[in-house]
Image (cartoon, helix red, strand yellow):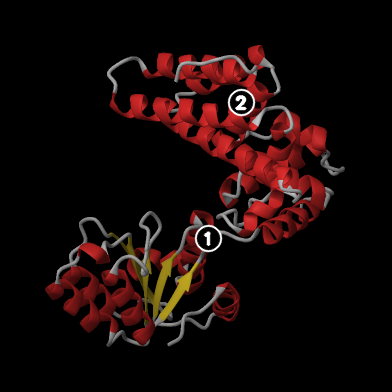
Amino acid sequence: MPEIFENDIKLHIKNNEFSNLYFIYGNEPYLKEFYAGKIIEKSVNKDFSMFNLHVFDGEDVLLNDVASCCESLPMMDEHCCVVVKDYKFDKANEEDRKQIEEIISDIPDTTILVFWMQNIEVDAKKNDKWKKTLTMMNKYGSCIALDKKTRSALVKLLVSGANKRGCALSSQNAEYLINLVGDDMNNLLNELEKLCFFADKSEITKQHIESLAVRSVSARVFDLATDIVQGRNEKAFEVLRTLLSQKEEPVNINSQLINAYVDIYRAKVFLASGEKADGAAKYYNYQNKSFRLTNAARDASKIDISAIRVCLDILAVADTRLKSSAVNKSLILEETIVKLILAANGERVTV
């Protein structure tokens, strides 16, 4: 069978017309969990799930047990649902893969078998075993890649979600929420639920979002970079202290700072050449995130290009030290912030 899409799985669930085999994968955890849960919910009567629902952890599953459950007849229900979560097909030997193919090639009409890759990355481009797995699954059933939605799709989702909850959310403010929270659907929907509760059937404003939404680590680190470049030194150290108090890894903070300064550098170069800052998105991987370049353009106007290069050198040295030194990592990061502040002010810094 050809690979199916989200609209297809929606129809399967709505019409209660299922394939006998599903392989669910992708990089959006919320969607994978949502649709795997819906298949289970709609295919098995919860009153008889003790008899008709069989869930296995792929880490220690025995394929003979999976085969046995697939062959069992449903009790007082139309279907028996067998779920194998996070099976490591890329680590399976040839004997195991042969047994899996034997199982999926002859699934009884009353059985729905779901291979659910919730926490495992399936990369068919880099790993030939995953490529063969997808080919095998598509031969006997339905594969569905549930990847992160485009930015425009997320905006529509948030606007519609607010409306269903009795609130109003403009597209502009939905964009702003994504900028702060990130594109993880689970986080976005949790924040939307909270915002709708506080808005209490009225409009969700930018002020609501600023005061209530929990910023993603990357958003907070980008704020840190902005504070440094804009000369808000006390604010920069306040943000840093908050990140460290929340147990964010210094190496991760430094890595996100590198991303922020790379954005500023690219924006600066494109502005200097007479183009718009977000023009860099055509040449670099900014899928759904070109807003970062627009924001970086604001900071680029406050710092000389030679100073940006020095800052990138400072961050590169810090990255090496954080990954190899026995020195307290928080101290390394604090020293790095001091050097970035000095560089932003045009002072000479020993990298």
Q: Which mark is residue 17?
A: none
Residue 350, percent across and down?
46, 16
Q: Nearer the viewer, residue 44 or 262?
A: 262
* Residue at point 72%, 43% (across, down): 272
Residue 68, percent across and down?
21, 75
Looking at the rendered image, the quarter that the C terminus falls into is: top left
Along the horizontal axis of the image, is 216 left or right of 86? right
Per the image, label 2 sits on a secondary structure element best described as: helix
Q: Is residue 178 something that shows in the picture?
A: no
Q: Identify the image quadrant of residue 148.
A: bottom right
Q: Nearer the viewer, residue 79 or 15?
A: 15
Residue 338, percent across and down?
53, 14
Along the horizontal axis of the image, is 31 left or right of 299? left
- How many labels sit on residues? 2
The residue to which callout 2 is attached is 224
- Identify the amino acid type marked 2: Leu
* Residue at point 65%, 17% (across, down): 345
Disc 2 residue crowd, few under 14, some 14–19, many 20+, Cα 10 Å? many
- Identify the amino acid type marked 1: Phe
Q: CA distance from mark 1 to mark 2?
A: 35 Å
Along the horizontal axis of the image, is 320 left or right of 220? left
Residue 133, percent across and down?
30, 74
Looking at the rendered image, the quarter that the N terminus falls into is: bottom left
Task: Mark 1 and mark 2 in contact? Answer it, CB < 8 Å.
Answer: no
Q: Nearer the viewer, residue 330 or 205?
A: 330
Disc 1 residue crowd, few under 14, some 14–19, many 20+, Cα 10 Å? few
First reached walking from the N terminus: tag 1 or tag 2: 1
Per the image, label 1 sits on a secondary structure element best described as: helix
* Residue at point 47%, 73% (across, down): 144
Q: Is residue 348 something that shows in the picture?
A: yes
Q: Which mark is residue 34?
A: 1
